[in-house]
Amino acid sequence: MVKNVSWIENKGFRQLARMELPGAGQVVVDGNYAYLANMKPPLGTTILDISDPKDPKIVSQIEIPLNVHSHKVNVSGDIMLVNHEKYRSYEGSEVSRGGLKIFDISNKANPREISFVEAGEWGYHRFTFDGRYCYGSPCPEGYEGNIVGILDLKNPEKPEYASMWWAPGQWVGGGEEPRPEGRRCRCHHPIRLGDRLYAGWWLDGWYILDISDLSKPEFVKHIKWQPPYARPTHTTLPIPFDIKGRKILLVSDEEARDQYAPVPNGFIWLVDITEETNPVPISTYRARKDDEPFDPDCWYGCHQPQEQIYGEQTHFAVTWFAGGLRMIDIADPWRVEELGYYIPEPGKGFDITQTNDVYQTPDGLYYITDRLGGFEILEWIG
């Protein structure tokens, strides 16, 4: 068990609500509804009415096959996207149908599937969605590891790929020589800012792509710091305004079983990308002073930051598994400051906390999930 961890600790947050829901990998909020992508079948997606954030209520739940993992979700208007990927804990013989499922959610109580984008057995992982394009990480047949797929949903009933991009060595079906990392070289998810895509690529670091022409992404830069650093890169979040005259990329390396070494634990990097062909790491943030060897039963390390940015805010909530939710300030990008934290109680039936995802709304509320169990709505009071 991880040492020196106490549950139910708080500095700067106020709890508004808690629900004992099954574990979830992601939460997104759109209007008066929150959408939770659950961790384990048969439960896929949960839709909550959060019009009263002190009293959220279940509106509907979507079930999935036992061989499918559907732990990611994104929403724009009446369209909801959820991932389907291979569920590794499935012990049966039926091959999973991986891909991206699209729903019409005009009736929140009765979501209606309108299309499905095939992506082999491994399917989709995480993705972002701007209402027209989905910037995702499919693993189509013939590819080793997830790649970038830019999907046009102008007609959500007939989505079409605008383009795909992959790292050299991933298209083994096309005759490319496989990478020695195998599936460890894969896209986690891309994030768009302007005509650039920033994509974490797991144990192959991260990439910057030029998408001035959406039909033909072009390579800009690749950074790989694994090894000597041990953990896979999860999120590459571009800050949409300059901080002290510099362009900043907030990068999270995830505390995960898939790793090069037991330490150091996953943490946050700030990278100066003012000159994008020469990115320079300028600071880091860790939730505690000393690293401890990876504990497979209780992860303690970074997962991911919030991806929502309002105005020129410089404070970001970051999920830290057993370390709960951490609030950091990057106003001085050379010296990241911790402002507060919130470590929830473990979910019902569990002995540990594993805070997994966070979503901030414009009114300053934070919606957090635990990968084992539990959902909370918090207010930052500083």
Image (spheres, rainbow, N blue to C red):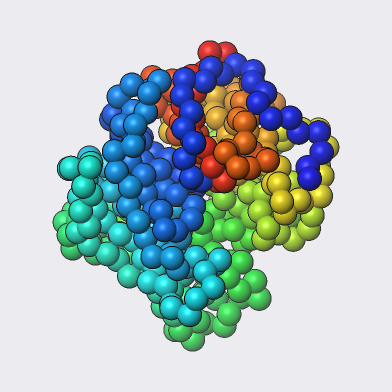
> Which x, y percent locates residue 361?
39, 27
Residue 289 image-quadrant placement? top right
Establish if 328 lies above or below 188: above
Residue 167 spot, x, y in % from top left: 52, 68
Q: Can residue 349 be seen in this view?
A: yes
Q: Nearer the viewer, residue 109 or 28?
A: 109
Where's the N terminus, which quadrant?
A: top right
Residue 62 in percent (x, y) is at: 32, 52
Q: In which quarter of the image is residue 163?
A: bottom left
101 displayed left or right of 266: left
Q: Which residue lies furthest to the top in this view?
A: 381
As rendered, which of 141 and 149 lies closer to the eye? Answer: 141
Residue at figure coordinates x 53%, y 24% from the top left: 314
Residue drawn at (43%, 77%), measured in percent from left and top? 95
Q: Is residue 198 visible?
A: no
- Outermost residue toward the bottom? 175
Taking depth in this image into account, of 165 and 325 the one nearest to the observer is 325
Q: Is residue 262 left or right of residue 104?
A: right
- For the C terminus, the image quarter is top right
Q: In this view, does 129 lie above or below 7?
A: below
- Which residue is located at x 76 percent, y 50 percent? 295
Above or below for 300 versus 332: below
User: What residue is shown at x 67% (from left), y 23% (from top)?
Assistant: 9
Q: Report the number of discs.
A: 0
Q: Position of residue 378 (x, y in %)?
A: 49, 23
Front residue of 118 and 217: 118
